[in-house]
Amino acid sequence: MQLKPHLRLFSIVFVLFAFLSEANAQKSDSGKIFARDSISKEGYTLIYINKDEEFSPEIGEKLKNTFFEVYPEMAKEYNKKAAKKVKFVIDPAYDGVAATSNGKVVFNPRWFDRLPGDIDVVTHEVMHIVQDYGRTPGPWWVTEGIADYVRYKYGVDNAGAGWSLPEVTDKQNYDNSYRVTARFFAWIVQNKNKNFIKKMDVVMRKHTYNDEIWVKLTGKNPAELWEEYKANPTI
């Protein structure tokens, strides 16, 4: 079944996003290193590289601890074949918040200057490693919605970052991605199919996404579900 035009557009955007993220991640391979660490636990290894002389060691330790708190559990739940070795790079040359590519997460240290409690950036980003969708798996908003749903479910201190799923408004739509979509997904899990995220995750990883998946998993298409959700969005 062919994708509708708006879904093809999301796929194109996802490819571009993945390409830019990979390019930015590759840039992080150069530059002076001020700290390097390798930690192995529970069959997983984290390589930690800090390229910012002013970056807080305490926050660095929190990022490492968060990885080992959430990643093994998420891999067990969603993808037992997820990468066993992950690299974190603290890179002041990167001007986003964080980007993930090929088992590596690049973090902007300036983000933590503004929000030192936002350690669950780790939870969102390493879920992308667990997802391992590659390029053009399906709609970009599904990918990011799942990652934020998982942050909502597994986050170690979302409250400390002032992070939560947003209240529903008339200006939102199911494909707004990130937290808006994550809240919609949480409602679907609660009211329609408790295995929705796990099954959608598999579909995305296998690159077999199509419009019919929604009806198969929930009995309705996303637009119909969204209308029902807006009428009673309690989670």
Image (spheres, rainbow, N blue to C red):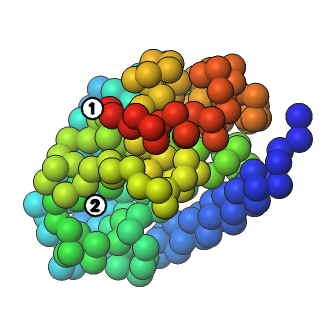
Residue 179 position (above or below residue 231) = below
Identify which residue, 111 or 35, lies in the foreground. 111
Residue 128 position (above or below residue 211) = below
Identify which residue, 148 or 100, lies in the foreground. 148
Q: Which residue is drawn at 57% across and 65% down?
A: 21
Identify which residue, 49 or 132, lies in the foreground. 132
Q: Where is residue 193 in the image (x, y as percent from the top left)?
A: 50, 19
Q: Identify the amino acid type marked 2.
A: Arg
Contact, mark 2 vs mark 1 (Cβ under 8 Å): no
Query: Which corner quadrant of the image does residue 90 belong to?
Result: bottom left
Q: Is residue 178 left or right of residue 116?
A: right
Q: Which residue does the numbered mark 1 point to in the structure image?
A: 41
Q: Kindly give the residue lying farthest to the right in the view shown.
A: 2
Q: Looking at the figure, which quarter contains the C terminus? A: top left
State how many labels appear.
Answer: 2
Q: Which residue does the numbered mark 2 point to in the structure image?
A: 36
